[in-house]
Amino acid sequence: MSESVGISENKGAVISINSSLEDSVKDLLKKSMEKGIFDAVLIPMKVPAGDSFVYVLIKDKSLLNNAFPIPPIMSVQGAKAISSVTRLGKGNLKIAAVMRPCEIRATVELTKLNQTNLENITLISMDCPGVMPISDFISEPDKAMKLFDNAIKTWDDKIMRPVCQMCDKSSMVASDLHIGTLGSKKDTFFVISNSQNGKDMLDNLGIKLKEDIDTWRAKVKDNNEEKMKKRKKTHMDLKTQIGSLDNLIDMFSQCINCHNCMRVCPICYCRLCYFDSDKVKQKSEDYLQMAKSKGSIRFLPDTTLFQIGRMMHMSLSCVSCGSCEDACPMSIPVAQIFSMIADETQEIFDYVAGRSQEEPLPLKTYNEDELHEVEDAHD
Amino acid sequence: MTKALKLSIKPEQGILEFLRFLLENGKVKGVFTLNKINKNGAVAYSLISNSDELNNAVPFFPIMPANAGKLLSRFTLKGGATEPVAAVVKPCELRAFIELVKREQGKLENILFISLTCGGVYPLSKAVYENVEKYLSEYWDVVKKGEISVDLRSACKGCTEFSPYNADITFDLLGNNDLDKNCIVFLNTKKGEEFAKGMNAKFLEKELDNKKLDKILDKRKIEKKKIFDELETKMNGMDGLIEIFGKCIGCHGCSKVCPICYCKLCGFDSSDFEYRSSNYEAEFRKRGGIRVPPRTLFYHLGRLDHISISCIGCGSCEDICPVDIPISVIFKKIGESVQKMFDYIPGKNIEEDIPLITFKEEEFAEVEQ
Amino acid sequence: MKKNKDFMPKILAFLCNWCSYAGADLAGTSRIKYPPSIMAIRVMCSSRVDPILIIDAYLCGFDGVLVAGCHPGDCHYQKGNYYTRRRFVVLKKIVEGLGLESDRLRLSWVSASEGQKFAKVSTEFTDNIKEIGENPVKSEIFL
């Protein structure tokens, strides 16, 4: 993704929908492949059994007919998919990646962490209605699909992941190109460019950026405000639930230390997590000593350490996608808790994870004169 | 004839009294068992050193939050237990620990193994969405009759290894009509006898009721066949595999909770099989597209090859899967067919080498063509 | 699925340095004909072949995978091929149990002097694979 030109320009393009929004988006992608703008497209497809969706790197453009730009679930976080393609260096293929805003933001964070190479990649996002929890979908795929199709039309998020229901960044543009469905006239959608790369792509397709996108901006603003209200309320409720160490331990009491949350998290890229390494493995006499000093210890005693430790390691880059909560076998509201802490830690530095490639990671930079409130008081 | 104890109380209390006896008399310095950790009924394994803390212990609770064999391996990985510890574990968890000891991932010394004839566990989802305590009386009723609870893990429903091997002490619970009033505790080893000496209970000599256990075994065999046959209909070649594993999200949770998967850095998480752009470009010469992240089936088939010889069929993998793939049935079915070739029951005999690290000079001539 | 019997199978062959690779070499120097289906990878001992390499080859789309080593008792490292035999037996059982085409996997003992045998094994295996057909996995997207 090349330098961001920002969407301070108030012009976009308006595209007519012929059959459906998804088909129109796929048409754009097909045309781009035909014109050689891209060699491959990374986009979700339905699996053969019909009970899930997975990212596929498509070379044969006829496969695009069966692609789903906005699937009802997020089985694998898109940033993980992109990282899997380019982690070990850019390739020769020009790839368009179609994913949700939080997946784009996670990709931007991973680029800053050297886990993704975005040269030759064009990121395309869209206004996101949210995703359903995976377990809700796979139990009854057909019914869930209908519910989701309805939700896209009405932008009603009741069926979505809890963190999606309070996501105020569902239209945040961190990509090269953004599909704006909010605030557009009937049977049309906006195409908004956010970078030179995006502009070039539209130029190549002969799409001119000359329409006003004020109605999109306005609807997005309304939507974000409503979501922000929900977010603040949920966070307040959560705070009372986990307001002390006892309550926090209680919240995580069902945790079985499987570390699924860590493994599906796009930001947690470490091959061997600190909390799986030798550092947390101790001798039997040490465990027995711990048991003696407290009367009894949970075995393994690392549950709270893992949760708070993971918060410390990744909250500055957390994009609140909610993949962790979907993967938790004990239905602990991990995403809601981590997302709340992420808001607070990112706020210290006025940082929004993945908002811009240019913004350095807060812990990889500093100002000589800052954050004095955390230091010891001097005379 | 084996030495045994008769405790004139129901087993859930009997085990607590026995553990209290062991701790308070200094026979063990710690007890490793399931513990209620909050008022909502969440249970977790705990290492208990103060006998007061035993008040919250629920050693025979029908939930397996983690395979205890894996936990015992962690406990003894950096060196065997330096003081005596009693561990209350299910038969499959004990077998898992033995398999891990064979792989030098744990040490047996100073651990008193207490197990039971096992009625199975409920899937973890039951503990998430309901209060398992509501089901306890129903559960014990079914155990009394030696039948199979309908809501158990599929691995437990078809489990034929419900009698523990290598336990020093076995609480014989399955199929005993008077389970509400008393329980028979077999002292299988000299060690078991030593630790039980002084316990306030009736000491006697008893024979394991093999007829009763055989009846239960038959029921379990029938259930196992049903479960395996059902899988057979779905698993018909490559297409079937692609369908079953289509929704796999590559979280590798199955590997992480599996007691046999002990590798610190699994090959499938390492850079060994990682794709770079040139691999994707090479794939495009054959395929019009490729799933990302790639090699889902490769991971499962590879893991099957590496661990099927020791799969103890506990079912932890299936419980952890976020998308409900019937992993434990697949691994148990294939695992048993592989183990049968060598007449090997994983975790049964600590002296028996894992079949893949040994050989006979003359065998399997038919496989060479 | 249409079986194209005229296709030339692609067979990946893991050949141990001391016996089967030398045997293959001998087939070559003796001008003994065998089909161009065999793609050889030389390993020091057949027991180096982790079965997951065979699985990888199968899923990559190879129509057949051959593992060839010294005759039991003649392994350059004394015992390697005994382990190979056991591992292969386990892999075959797994592949059969999953309903996959286990005939695509073959284990053969070929000594350094058995150029003729190598050619025979290669020809037979190629013919078998032609009967079974091309590996449909090579065009699969959702692996």
Image (cartoon, coloured by chain):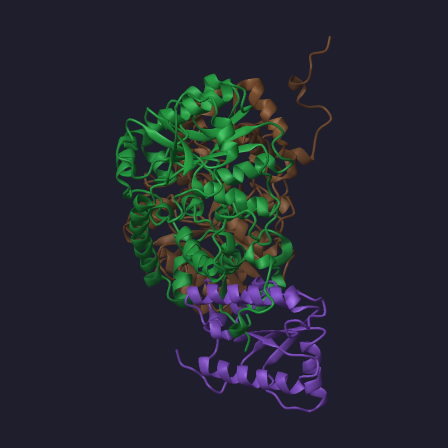
Chain colours: A brown, B green, C purple
User: Can the viewer see residue B68 in this picture?
Assistant: yes
* Pick the front one: A166 or C112: C112
Location of residue A119 in the rendering, given as x and y in whole percent from the top left corner: 63, 56
- Between C83 and B117, the residue placed more toward the observer is B117
Q: Residue B201 placed where, x, y %?
A: 39, 23
Residue A284 in the image, given as x and y percentages of width and height: 61, 31
Query: How many dots with numbers?
Result: 0
Q: Is residue B363 left or right of residue A283?
A: left
Along the viewing direction, whichever of A298 and A327 lies nearer the viewer: A298
Question: In this picture, is B366 found above or below B132?
Answer: below
User: Image quadrant for the N terminus of chain C?
Assistant: bottom left
Residue A160 to residue B249: above or below: above
The answer to whether A236 appears left or right of A2 in the picture is left
Q: Quadrant of residue B137?
A: top left
Q: Position of residue A29 (x, y in %)?
A: 47, 62
View extreme (top): residue:
A379
Instruction: Specify whether C124 is left or right of B321.
Output: right
* Residue plotted at (42% across, 40% down): A329
Q: Quadrant of residue A288?
A: top right
Q: Quadrant of residue A218?
A: top left
Q: Residue at x 68, y 36 (%)?
A: A364
Say whether residue A171 is visible.
no
Q: Is residue C101 above or below residue A110?
A: below
